[in-house]
Image: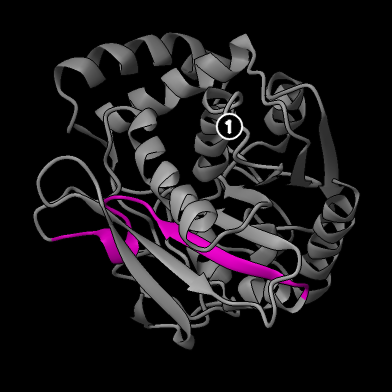
Amino acid sequence: MTADVLGTDYEIRTLPLGGGDVSATLVRRRAQPATRGAVLYVHGFADYFFQKHVAEHFTARGFDFYAIDLRAYGRSLTPSQTANYVADLAEHFEEIDAAVRVIHEEDHHERLVVMGHSTGGLITSLWAHQRRADDVIDALVLNSPWLDLAEPWITRTVGTAFIRGIGRVVPRLVLKKGLGPVYGESIHADHHGEWDFDTTWKPIEAFPVLAGWLRAVRRGHARLHRGLDVSVPVLLLRSGRSLLHAKKWTPEAMTADTVLDVAHMQRWAPSIGRNVTVVQVDNGMHDLLLSAESVRKRALAEIDEFLDQV
């Protein structure tokens, strides 16, 4: 482990992965002492780990905190890579497996909680289903997970057929130049938010949406919609409402999910596993843990209560 950009309390370790210069980055902050095990955080699309207040919250409660910057994201992104691109979400299972091995085998944690945000929530759900017989995690926490396309019915059906075809033939075709400025402006301190993050790793308007990557996401959605069997307890946190397809920032964006449809989260939550609890956190933004202080405190309190029971 070496020092990280977040400061002296944070260490990073490169996790080599199969294939050329591909790697992931594991970030660690130690608890003093770690009496309750470990938490592993997995970010979403056009994202990386910078939420120091989340790490501090869990280390103060006796968890060693880990976060992974997935391949081609954040600390792991190299100049030769297409930012955030994979052709199959299951490619990310390799780096989650590598992180879990470090946590269990090298740092000797018996108890592990995995947290996933947005696309990370979809990836970790699929991963937890795939590893359900391996007994490697004790709980799964999902912060506004991406469980369906936040588009009208015709786009989710006919449009998905087009995405699957074009994504197979021309995988790096740009479908959208980004996700628009509304969410990024809601969270960054240079605009309307509280948070200072590296906009080369997390651009205000996100990275381009490529056909092959969106095909991979839609295949992941389809697998989840058929029903997963995540065997550990799952907590799914979502905002009370969505504000979708806004072109410009308004104050309403500070109290709603402007990226995903919370109704989809509610609808598909039972498809994740046998024991899924959904909690509505009113006035939350897309990342509930970057929302207004009272909102993120409520979200963290819900997670604490959940972890006290599992």
* Position above or below: 45 against 74: above
Q: Is residue 89 above or below residue 164?
A: below
Q: Residue at x 52, y 22 (%)?
A: 221
Residue 24 belongs to the span the image colors magenta: no
Q: Which residue is mark 1?
A: 128
Question: Horizontal placement of 39 versus 205: left or right?
Answer: right
The secondary structure type at the circle numbered 1 is: helix
- Work out whether 206 lies above or below 30: above
Q: Is residue 79 visible?
A: yes
Specify whether 288 is left or right of 216: right
Quadrant showing the C terminus: top right
Q: Position of residue 253 (x, y in %)?
A: 65, 59
- Residue 67 lies in the magenta stretch: yes
Q: Residue at x 55, y 49 (%)?
A: 246
Residue 47 visible from this viewpoint = no
Figure quadrant of the N terminus: bottom left
What residue is rendered at 45% in x and 49% in y?
101
Q: Which residues are magenta?
A: 61-78
Image location (x, y in percent) of residue 99? 44, 52
Nearer to us in this view, 153 or 222: 222
